[in-house]
Amino acid sequence: MDTAASRFLPYGQIIIDVIPEVELIIGKQPPIAEVGATETQNRFNRVFGQFIRVFSSAEYPLVIFLDDLQWADSATLKLIELMMTDAQTQYLFLIGAYRDNEVNYSHPLTIMLEGLRQKGAITS
């Protein structure tokens, strides 16, 4: 098995919890130890970043399309920000769509996008 893929396998159940079809590829996974809410979120963000890196390469860039971002919760916006600013994540093209009539200058999505621009991410 590819070493990049094996990096997230000890925590494969975390990915299966959000993308159940992954179990068909990596098989049944052992349960994950319970931790506090903050550590659970941090662990998910780290493992999901590793998962994304497995599927993005120079030969096969990964394109992700996210719709209705005007309704995204703060955890989702944070995950998007982490993916877009992670120096180890390359060859990822994230396309997001939202209803601009539902997003103003103080909307969390607008704030996150401005933060990405300030960090050097290319947005349009």
Image (cartoon, grey):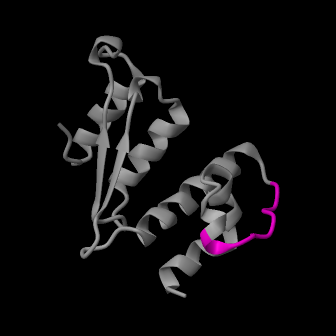
The answer to whether residue 45 is left or right of residue 9 is: left
The answer to whether residue 124 is left or right of residue 115 is: left
Q: Position of residue 112 (x, y in %)?
A: 36, 33
Q: Position of residue 14 (x, y in %)?
A: 67, 58
The answer to whether residue 116 is left or right of residue 25 is: left
Name the main secondary structure of what is drawn in magenta: loop
User: Compared with residue 26, is residue 13 higher up or lower down, i.e. above or below?
Assistant: above
- From the image, which quarter does the C terminus lie in? top left
The answer to whether residue 29 is left or right of residue 45 is: right
Boundaries of the magenta span: 25-34
- Which quadrant of the figure has residue 111? top left
Q: Is residue 50 magenta?
A: no
- From the image, which quarter does the N terminus lie in? bottom right
Label count reads 0
**Residue at point 60% right, 53% down?**
19
Q: Is residue 32 magenta?
A: yes
